[in-house]
Amino acid sequence: MLELRYFAWLRERIGTGQEQIDTKAETVAELIEEIKALSEAHAFAFSDLTAIRAAVDQELVEFDTPLTQAREVAFFPPMTGG
């Protein structure tokens, strides 16, 4: 089981801040495709991947990152400095 965490407008669009998924995805990109298939809300939340960043086990990663032994994947909008 993989723990998914959603932040900011992703959480609002999906309707939850976290959920668990049993996945066969080997990369973050493959995981996103599985997530998009869960519901219309998930598909809408992940419709613009340029507006989403990911972290695997609390480390910022690219979408082609392998999920080998990952326990948690978080998704959030890009952060801005200030």
Image: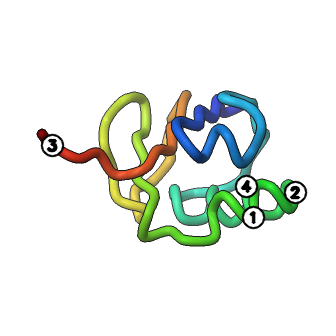
Label 3 – label 1 distance at C-alpha = 28 Å
The residue carrying pointer 3 sits among few (fewer than 14), some (14 to 19) or many (20 or more) residues within 10 Å by Cα, namely few
Q: In the rendered image, which quarter contains the N terminus? A: top right
Label 1 – label 2 distance at C-alpha = 6 Å
Mark 2 or mark 4, whichever is nearer to me: 2
Compared to residue 1, the image places residue 63 above or below, namely below
Label 2 – label 4 distance at C-alpha = 8 Å
Mark 1 and mark 2 residues within 8 Å of each other at the beta carbon: yes
Label 4 – label 3 distance at C-alpha = 29 Å
Q: First in sequence, mark 4 or 1: give its number.
A: 4
- Residue in view at x 87 percent, y 57 percent: 39
- Residue in view at x 86 percent, y 62 percent: 40
Residue lying at the far left in this picture: please name it.
Answer: 82
The residue singled out by tag 1 in the image is 43
Q: Amino acid at mark 3?
A: Gly
Secondary structure category for the residue under label 3 = loop
Mark 4 or mark 1, whichever is nearer to me: 1
The residue singled out by tag 2 in the image is 39
Label 3 – label 2 distance at C-alpha = 33 Å
Where does residue 51 sit, x and y in percent of width and height? Answer: 44, 63
Where does residue 67 sit, x and y in percent of width and height? Answer: 50, 47
- Residue in view at x 74 percent, y 45 percent: 14
> Which of the labelled discs sits on residue 81, or is there none?
3
- Residue in view at x 66 percent, y 58 percent: 45
The residue singled out by tag 4 in the image is 35
Mark 4 and mark 1 residues within 8 Å of each other at the beta carbon: no
Mark 2 and mark 4 residues within 8 Å of each other at the beta carbon: no
